[in-house]
Image: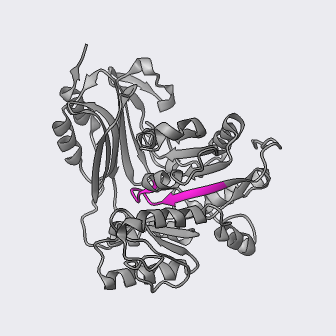
Amino acid sequence: MILTSTTIFQNIPCTLVTGFLGAGKTTLINHLLTTKPTEQRWALLINEFGRIGIDGTLLKGADWWQAAQETIAVREVSGGCICCTSQLPLQIAISRLLSEHKPQRLLIEPTGLAHPRELVQQLSEPHWQTALQMQAVLTVLNAIQWQQAKYREHEGFAVHVQEADALIINRYDHLSADEIQALQAWIATLNPHATIIWAAHEPAAAVSHDSDHSDNPDNSSNGSSDKNDALPAYITMLREQLTKPSQVLNRQHKVALGPLAKSAIRTPLQGNTSAVFALADPTLASNSAQNSTDSELPYRYHETQQDLLLAGWRLPAHYLLPADTLQSWLLRLPNWQRIKGVVHTSDGWLQLNFTPDSLTTRTVGAQSDSRLEVILQGADNGSNDGADHTPIAIDWQPYDRQLMAMVVALG
């Protein structure tokens, strides 16, 4: 089934924001949205690997949301990769955003386990060519992840670099000069055409350069030593990328000799997906999280995708969780790779955004429910870093009970 776009939508600029799991795509999206002219309508399509849907809430907690929410539409597609198995969820989501919001720019954030080449290829199909104008593919690269062999040697990590028009490198402040040179050399072997942007976060400086991979990120783009100018300079560089056509797409068209070869990366739905349960009745199962309704809270799901174990929980807003106990419990989960949540706690409503190298919490306004999602490494990822990657199996029932035992019901 192919959905055709209506002819009233012509050449809407579309930017992909890619990056491996935990790279920092949500932070980059926040930075991009600060570049939006006040009067323009933008749309954001978020694809989450899990089924709960949290990234949209994380974005709406940002400082820009209150002022800009009338001109930014956010739609989430949860429960697997939009570039895998079928294009239909992607087509439906984009078509609805275009028809309902009529945006002047579209941003798409696929899951960190998506294959960017396939996604770019799908968005350049004939039925989108008149509606969407593909701009530079922006890819986030986490320098702390890069330092670890299990990431550098992971095909999914490398392919994001290969399919980038611009690489936004974050968490690089701790790198030595030699490590920065090694990182740039590694990028050059995979993608010598990429523009490199060193992400600024106060008080770091930023610099952008194209195929020359020898520049030092400690030098600012304008030669100024005023670190207070770093973030505005970085935002300016991001804004420039929004108007550059995708060279990745052009190169794909030049070398395409037939149908796009499928990557060796397995699609999420090739994993074994477990049944979905409602906590209120552990014996109640369904085949899809989409069958859950707000009236069925509390709700949880557990499943396996690729070599990852996923679990998510939604709890009624009046369930209160002790903040310190909850965070300690989450951090004790085995081999966790990502933890996200918006939770009603003893410290108020908190956003949780945890990666192995960053633990971020912030207070937010009251939500309609509490949401938690965790991703665990479930099997050997093929790296040669000497670490123990013995496949693990999780009995989630004790964890469900432990979480519920923390709950204090209000009212």
Count of all numbered marks drawn on residues in the image: 0
Query: How far across and how far down the image is residue 131, in percent?
Result: 76, 50
On whether residue 24 falls in the magenta region, the answer is yes
Q: Is residue 278 left or right of residue 67?
A: left
Residue 373 in sight: no
Q: Is residue 234 above or below residue 208?
A: above
Q: Is residue 406 left or right of residue 8?
A: left
Instruction: Name the residue rendered at 16%, 39% in the picture.
Output: 324
Based on the displayed image, in which of its 4 quarters is residue 251 positioned? bottom right
Magenta region:
14-25
Q: Which residue in the rendered view is the most extreme toward the right?
A: 7
Residue 220 in sight: yes
Based on the displayed image, in which of its 4 quarters is residue 255 positioned? bottom right
On whether residue 259 falls in the magenta region, the answer is no
Q: Which residue in the rendered view is the most extreme toward the top?
A: 411
Q: Is residue 34 above or below residue 370?
A: below
Query: How far across and how far down the image is residue 139, in percent?
Result: 51, 64
Query: How far across and how far down the image is residue 198, in percent?
Result: 43, 71
Q: Nearer the viewer, residue 152 or 393?
A: 152
Quarter occupied by the C terminus: top left
